[in-house]
Amino acid sequence: MTGFSAARPHTLFTALLVSLLTLAGAAGAQAQEAPGMPAYGVRYTCAPDRLEPLRAAMAHYLLDLGIPAHLVQVRVDQPRGQVTYALAGTGENTRTLYLAWRPELAIQDEEVQVPVSDQETRPLKTVSRKEIVLALLHPGRLTEFREQACDVQALIDHVGVRQTTVMWAEVLHWGWPDGDAAEWNTRYWHQGTPLPDVALHEALNDLFFQQDKYSIGCYTATKIVFAQGTLDYYRRVKNDPETARRVAQRLLADQEPLVDVEPGRMWSFEPDFEAEELQRPGKLLRMVEGVASDNFVPGDWIYLLNTDAQTYQRTGYEGSNAIYLGRNRFDDYYNDNNHYYSYQEKLSEVFQWRHGVFNRRRDFAKHKPLSPQDYERLSATPDKGGMLLGYRVVPYLFGYEPLPELPGATTPPGGPAPGTPETPASPAPVAASGG
C-alpha cells in the first residue's frame, strides 16, 4: 500500500534504486558524531549556566516516568554547554522493537482517554511515555534539543505528540480503495479538503469518529494520523490554545491540510522526483537520517519500498507507509490484521506482493515462507537488498524551534481562527490508492 499518489507517473525502476544509493550515502554521512561523545540518546545544547537547572528538571521527569537513575548514562560537556542522556548497559545493540519485553525496564502500556464523539471518551491502552523516552535514549539515533529547545518541556511535548499520534493509530478500520477513488464524508470534506464552514479539528475528528464513511490509501491515512495527533495533543491533551493555533495555521497555510505534511525530500529516491521539492519543508514533520535500521521510536513514520520491479508498477503497491506504535507494532489502517502488524509481518506483507498476495485471505496459497535470514536481509536499506528506507520522519518541536517558512502560504499574518479555513480552495490531489 503505497506512499504515492495515483498521479505520480512510474518511470524506469532501476533509476529509483540508483537514487536510493545516493540517499543512503547522504544519510550515513550525516550520522557522524564528535569524538568522545555517544552517537545516541537525547542531547541538550545550550548556555553552560543552564545545564544544572536542566539536569534537575530532567532527573525529576525521568523519576516521574519510573526510569531509575542507574538505567541512564549522563555525560556533561560543560565547555560546549551539552548534556547527553543515554540508556546504559545496551552495548552495540540498536534494536528497540522489544524494549517492552525487557523485565529490567518494567514498561507497561499507559491508559489514556480517547474521544469517540464530541462529548464522549473511552479508555484506551496505548504506548507509554516511558517506552517512548527509553527508545529515544537507546543506541541507534541521536535526538538533539538546541538553544530555545534546551528545555525539558520541549522533550515532554515531543513525547506527548508521539504518544497522542500513536493513540489515534491504535484502532482504525478505514476502507481501502485498491485503486478506486478515495471516499470522504461530504458533510466535512470535499476530496480531502475541509469544507469552508468546518473547523479543521472537527473535520479531522470525523475521520476517526465515523471511519466507515471513509476509504483512503495509506499515504493519506498516515498524514491524517500525524495531523490529528499533533493538533489534538496541543488542543485537547495539553490544552495549549496558542500552539494549537500555530499547528492549525501551518496545516491551513495553503488551505490544504493534508498536502505537504512531510518534507518533499522524503520522496527524493523516486525516479520522477522534481528538484524543486528537495528544499520544501514539511508542515508538521522533518526527516531524521542516519538511524540504525532496527531502531524505531513510537511515533516514527517509516517507509517500506516494494523493490520488485513488476509489482511496483501496480498503483497502491509501490511501498507501504507505516507508523511505529511501540511494542513491536505497526499500524493497521484497515483492520486486516487485528489492528496492528509486527515488524516481521509488515516486512512480509510488502515482500509477498511480488508473489501476488494482495489479499491475505484470498491469496493465502501464494504466500511464500520467509526465514530469519530473509527478515534480516529485508530490514536493510534497498541498496543493501532490503526494503526499509534509512530515515525516519518525526514531529517538529512546536514552540521550541523556528520552523521553516512554507512556500506559497496564503494565510494572512496572525492566521485564521484555530482550525478554521477562511476561504475554500480547489481540491487537493489526495491519493486514493496510496497505502
Image (tube, rainbow, N blue to C red):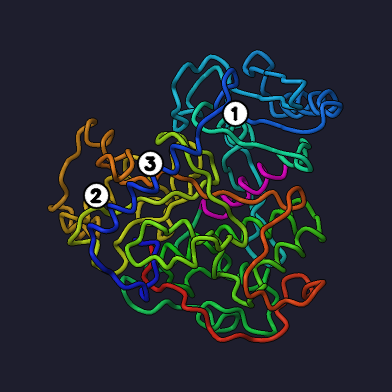
Could you tell me if the residues under marks 3 and 2 are in contact, i.e. CB atoms within 8 Å? no
Label 1 vs label 3: CA separation?
24 Å
The quadrant of the image that shows the C terminus is bottom left
Quick one: 345 or 115, which is closer to the camera?
345
Label 1 vs label 2: CA separation?
32 Å
Quarter of the rendering containing residue 44 = top right
Quick one: 49 or 138, which is closer to the camera?
49
Image vertical order of residue 114 relative to residue 28, above or below? below
Would you name the residue on which mark 3 appears? 342
User: How many numbered discs sit on the rendered protein?
Assistant: 3
Instruction: Specify whether 221 is left or right of 273.
Output: right
The residue sitting at 13% across, 52% down in the picture is 365
Main SS class of the magenta portion in the image: helix
The tag earlier along the polypeptide, 1 or 3, is 1
The residue sitting at 49% across, 50% down in the picture is 301
Give the mark toward the camera: 1 or 3: 1
Could you tell me if the residues under marks 1 and 2 are in contact, i.e. CB atoms within 8 Å? no
In x, y percent, where is residue 342? Answer: 38, 41
In x, y percent, where is residue 423? Answer: 69, 86
